[in-house]
Image (cartoon, grey):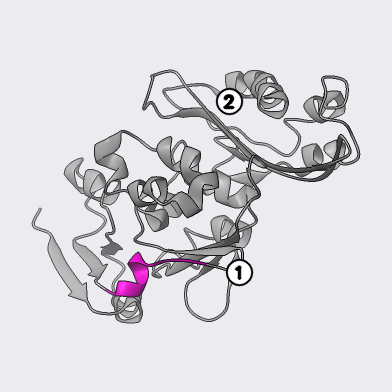
Amino acid sequence: MAMTLQTFSTADAAGAALAADDASRYIGGGTLVVRQANEGDVSFSTYVRATDPALSAITVEDGRATLGASVTMGRIIADGRLAGLAEAARSVGGPAIRNVATVGGNLYAPAPYGDLAVALLALDATIEVGGGPIPLSAFLADRHGTYAHTVLKSVGFALPSAGSLRFLKVSRVKPKGISVVTIAALLEEKDGTITSARVAYGCMADRPIRAQAVEAALIGKPRTADGIRDALAVATDGTSPITDAVASAWYRSQVLPVHLGRLLLA
């Protein structure tokens, strides 16, 4: 099937074109949407793209980073100011994919993809799609509804202190297999006690989710085998793991506490 490409100079103009045509899809890096077309998806016939420079901008100011939706994984890895996020970006595919895969595309990517989104969720990121900032968790919950035909402009987050963001992607094919489970944890500690915890999962639902029961169980505890025991006991609370060719929902539920423990104690 022939595909049409429409190019706009602003994100808003591209968003208007998307909203006006249900048979259109936004193309950033194209790692997912082009593959869908190549595999015979006939639900769309038009690619929409924007050349807006703001979509490719990286801004770091006053301890906060803002990444345009077209920023690639490769640029995150290469930017020393984003060192805390580099490990998550490095988990996305191989070098060729990382050079084209974008932040915006990762936030729309269905499970088992979207590894960077897990780290951003642990960072309590906000996104901009026009108007004011929206919590990333709210966007992810409605990304295929309200936000299905909008152009994501940017994502912003407070830069984590050195060593506070922990990230783990478990896959069966190294070094660039898709995820069995992905875990990100932002921990703050004082005098040997966890004072703040934000934990996020990938592949444990149809989108990245926060592990709120785990977070509550970690607060006030030491980061030791005994201290995290209660958190591991509730590791799967609130989850609904996916089943795919890589792993079943049952398997993901069984291995999650093991890998969460390793991440927390690393």
Q: Is 134 on the left-hand or right-hand side of 102? A: right
**What stretch of residues is rendered in magenta?**
52-60
Q: Does label 1 or label 2 sit earlier along the sequence? A: 1
How packed mark 2 is, by other alpha carbons closer than 10 Å (few <14, some 14-19, many 20 or more), is some
**Judging from the image, what secondary structure is the residue with disc 1 in?**
loop
Residue at the (68%, 27%) spot, across then down: 260
Q: Is residue 111 visible?
A: no
Residue at the (25%, 51%) spot, across then down: 30
Q: Is 211 on the left-hand or right-hand side of 148? A: right
Q: CA distance from mark 1 to mark 2?
A: 42 Å
Residue 176: name its quadrant. Answer: top left
Q: Is 120 on the left-hand or right-hand side of 264? A: left
The correct choice, above or below, for 85 with respect to 71 in the image is above
- In the image, 8 versus 243, the foreground residue is 8
**Judging from the image, what secondary structure is the residue with disc 2 in?**
helix
List the residue tagged with mark 2.
249
Q: Amino acid at mark 1?
A: Asp
Residue 255: name its quadrant. Answer: top right
Residue at the (72%, 41%) spot, across then down: 211
Q: Is residue 233 visible?
A: yes
Numbered mark located on residue 62 in the image: 1
